[in-house]
Amino acid sequence: MSVLDIDGHRIGVLFPAEDIAARVNAIARDIAARQPVNLVVVPILKGSFVFAADLIRAMHHAGLSPEVDFMILSSYRKSTKSSGQVTVLRDIETDVRGRDVLLIDDILESGRTLAFAKDLISARGSRTTLTAVLLDKPGHLAANIVADFQGFVCPDKFVVGYGMDMAHQFRELPFVGHVIPEQPASAKTRAEQET
Ligand code: IMP
Ligand code: MG
């Protein structure tokens, strides 16, 4: 795994840009194969904005012409652990009644964010509510949800890049990486000797 030094942090590359692009194209083709009707794509911001931007363009190449509207949900409170509480910071303006909706999120971890959004959209009378996530981080599921489309299974690490942040940093990275925690000086010496 390649490790980059960015802004004083060591970031290990988990999913390089080329691998992400290939998965995004494959997901777009899978979505098109479901032949959605009158499709509205709803990226759940902020973390999904890069994934969504690439996915809707890949969807165009797969023959789809979706509308796009945005929802900002908050379930994270500064720390790297979910608070469990989901709040709508910005709602969509689109009437979804009778329409196929595709929710896009960056990561499915506890599933609370996506389950909340899916319930909300379904309760408003969408015909179907599909979900696409870039990463599925298993082992923490606390809601009854499985993404219809997913990019990669994510190791149990806090990841950044490709839209995802750690305390507002690293959204701009073109790959998905994880921040390697600082090791205490003694452990560092041992680790360095091993390599
Ligand atoms: P869930 O509600 O627990 O499924 O959390 C999903 C949301 O938590 C995602 O949309 C992300 O914004 C955020 N999240 C979960 N894990 C990570 C991570 O490793 N890095 C950055 N954000 C994360
Ligand atoms: Mg998010």
Image: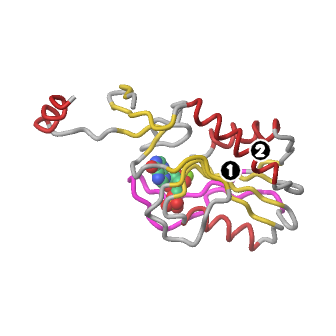
Q: Nearer the viewer, residue 35 or 77?
A: 35
194 displayed left or right of 107: left
Question: 159 or 150: nearer the eye?
Answer: 150
Which of the 4 image quadrants contains residue 184? Answer: top left
Q: Is residue 73 above or below residue 60?
A: below
> Helix, strand or loop at disc 2?
helix
Residue drawn at (55%, 47%), measured in percent from left and top?
152
Q: Residue at x 34, y 31 (%)?
A: 10
Q: Position of residue 137 (x, y in %)?
A: 48, 55
Q: How is the image coloured?
A: secondary structure
Q: Residue at x 66, y 56 (%)?
A: 90
Membership of 86 in magenta stretch: yes
Q: Quadrant of the C terminus?
A: top left
Where is residue 110 shown, x and y percent of the image? 49, 64
Q: Residues within 10 Å of mark 2 (few under 14, many from 20)?
A: some
Looking at the image, which is closer to me, 22 or 141? Answer: 22
Residue type at tag 1: Pro
The Cα atoms of the two marked residues, 1 and 2, are separated by: 18 Å
Callout 1 secondary element: strand
Mark number for residue 52? none
Earlier along the polypeptide chain: callout 1 or callout 2? 2
Q: Which residue is mark 2?
A: 29
Q: Position of residue 40 (x, y in %)?
A: 81, 54
Task: Give the image location of residue 130, x and y in percent.
Answer: 73, 60
Farthest residue to the left: give it: 186
Q: Which residues are magenta?
A: 70-95
Q: What residue would you read off at disc 1?
A: 43
Residue 126 among magenta residues: no
Q: Residue at 53% of width from left, 54% of height from top?
A: 136
